[in-house]
Amino acid sequence: MPEMSKNPTGVAAAEAAGDGSAAPPPLLEISGLRTHFTTREGVVKAVDGVDLAVGERRTVCVVGESGCGKSVTARSILGLVDRPGEITGGSILWRGGDRTSPVDLAKLDPHGEELRRIRGGEISMVFQEPMASLSPMYTIGDQLTETIRLHLPMTKAEAKDHAIAMLRKVGIPKPEQRFNAYSFQLSGGMCQRAMIAIALACGPGLLIADEPTTALDVTIQARILDLIASLQESSGMSVMFITHDLGVVAEIADEVVVMYLGTVVERGPVDEIFHDPKHPYTQALLDSVPAMGQGRGQRLRQIRGRVPHPSERAEGCPFHPRCDSAIAGVCDTTEPPETVFGPDRTARCVLYTPGLGTPGNVPGDTDPAEEREVPANG
Ligand SMILES: Nc1ncnc2c1ncn2[C@@H]1O[C@H](COP(=O)(O)OP(=O)(O)OP(=O)(O)O)[C@@H](O)[C@H]1O
């Protein structure tokens, strides 16, 4: 596919494509986000120039190995970055609620009233560890009604009815009884459902789910994914889903964002990411999981080395020390520019930069007969 002009969100790319299909602006549009931690040992650039967008009713999965900056990106959206972390650059445009013009969440006071109203009301988040997010001091019902009354104009009695209806909706049996239970009286799966009930109680436009099923067994995991999908269908919300599990991505994603060391190295529609990965890191991630129908005897390829700490980020392309396609004298010196392949389809690798990469090395140049299999879930 021919290279198009640089464009961080892809929206203008659709316009630039001249196909008349000017998409509506995304609900959430992150551009050049930088979130750094100033520590005694130095500045940790956990998120260092992230661009991504989530459209209405879309599910965007953010993938990458541990330590790539997925959680810090998600927490930056809602002003939930722990000290000494802070947003040092970029913008997070939010167009949800009944706004006529976007609000830049990166510019809001993390402790201020406006972000507090957006958090839990217009955008909610569920975390990997429900036990850590739910308070052991209050009942599930107290925590639900508190969120509901913070964001919706309801009396105590109305909030209680709504809370019980939400518990029922997420599949918690005997919701009237569970309303009075504490988190330590519930199983991990039930706690995660309660967290989802709290997250969805106020009808958010966007749900951010940070590895919400990683700590659960596979059966419960599948149920939670079904639950999110059915609630998404009935409410029309968008979902930003952070996961290590490419099987989950294949199942739920519309679009995929691949992160490496605080930057987005590739993004695009899920089918294109699985069948025509552009970036060697995306390729390596896909090669490291079993594909559907893969023979038992076939060995999986591990990605060489490990993700370094952000303070040990290499010069040039941050992935080059682990990359089998790295070009000496190029990848170790040049920050790869973003190449736009189409609307919302980008990669950051010099292999696609005219004059820098070697066409024969381009990882996408495979025989179509050798198309990649979608990984099996789990
Ligand atoms: N409070 C902090 N102080 C210093 N560095 C931090 C802090 N919190 C996170 N980091 C660093 O930021 C980087 C990104 O972390 P983050 O949790 O976003 O990664 P991740 O991709 O979500 O990983 P995982 O999949 O394991 O959750 C890591 O190198 C981490 O060490």
Image (cartoon, rainbow, N blue to C red):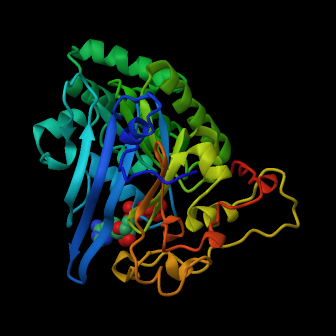
Residue 149 sits above or below residue 285 on the image: above
Residue name at image x 47 percent, y 42 percent? 343
Residue 46 in view: yes
Q: Position of residue 337 (x, y in %)?
A: 40, 65
Q: Quadrant of residue 294?
A: bottom right
Q: Please give left or right for residue 271 compared with residue 112 in the image.
A: right
Instruction: Residue 227 in the image: state x and y as whole percent.
Output: 55, 30
Q: 252 left or right of 143?
A: right
- Observer able to see residue 180: no
Question: How far across and how far down the image is residue 79, in percent?
Answer: 23, 49
Task: Tally the numbered discs.
Answer: 0
Query: Looking at this view, is 21 or 41 the one in front?
Result: 21
The image quadrant of residue 254 is top right
Residue farthest along the bottom direction in this orientation = 329
Q: Is 285 in front, or is 241?
A: 285
Foreground of the two, 232 or 172: 232
Identified at 14% across, 48% down, the residue is: 107
Residue that appears at 12% across and 47% down: 109
For ligand 1, the image quadrant comes to bottom left
Q: Position of residue 132 (x, y in %)?
A: 38, 51
Q: Residue at x 24, y 69 (%)?
A: 37
